[in-house]
Image (cartoon, rainbow, N blue to C red):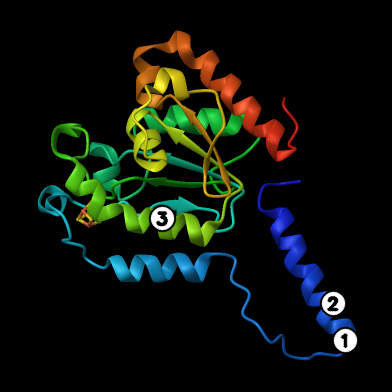
Amino acid sequence: MAIGAEKNTAIKRVLRFYEALGVERVPLSIDDGTGALRAVRAEMGDCTRCKLHKGRTNIVFGEGNPSARLMFIGEGPGKDEDAKGRPFVGEAGQLLDKLINRMGLGRGDVYIANIVKCRPPGNRDPEDDEVDSCMAFLKQQIEAVRPEIIMTLGRIAAHMLLETKVPITKLRGKFQRYGDILVMPTFHPAYLLRNPKDKMLVWADAQEVLHKLGLEVK
Ligand code: SF4
């Protein structure tokens, strides 16, 4: 079953239940995450909450299935992402696409976001004050999408989301928790471009995720 389809099936089941009861109007609002994500984006506006706004071309909010079962989180936009306003669209993004496709999924099945939404100058790591300013938006995105599993990409994303300093080499490949959501820390695709031999480790992590989601490992 395609990712996100289970949630849609559950919603349809609820609607049929009300229909069987003769209810013409469902007394609750069912949002697949789209409305909540729009509200987060609206709250962000033309954000100037941290100094990263000064050098950005575009805010890179995030994109994908608003009710995705799987969410990817990176650290922040690079040059290509800043230019296009979309996450993971450069060379590293193409590698992420390959991973997603190898998992039997497409970009439209998952949700992709970053810790900070504006490009740090020269692709430096985001600084603590910048993460502190932006993190609330990511938390709201997670709350809106409600994924079953998050794959963090690279050291910064894992450290910031999990609030730990444990080296990524130790975190990688072992499920962690963000509230009731499972988190699989793995390497960043940009790292894999420099260290292609470690692609097998990331694929092993992805297979663990597929297994947890009950999806077929191809
Ligand atoms: Fe606002 Fe986040 Fe951009 Fe900073 S990085 S300006 S908090 S959207």
The answer to which image quadrant residue 61 occupies is bottom left
Q: Where 157 falls versus 218 (above or below)?
A: below
Query: Reading the chain from its start, which is encountered first: label 1 or label 3?
Result: 1
- Residue shown at 20% from the left, 48% from the top: 130
Identify the amino acid type marked 2.
Answer: Phe
Q: Which of 19 and 87 is in front in this view?
A: 19
- Where residue 183 appears, x then y in whole percent? 53, 38
| In-image side of 144 versus 138 (left or right) | right
Q: What is the CA distance from the residue labelled 1 to the residue labelled 2?
A: 6 Å
Q: Name the residue under label 2.
A: 17
Q: Name the residue under label 3.
A: 139
Circle 3 packing at 10 Å, graded few (<14), some (14-19), many (20+), is few
Identify the amino acid type marked 1.
Answer: Leu
- Where residue 6 appears, x then y in whole percent? 74, 54
Q: Where 111 falls versus 197 (above or below)?
A: below
Query: Reading the chain from its start, which is encountered first: label 3 or label 2?
Result: 2
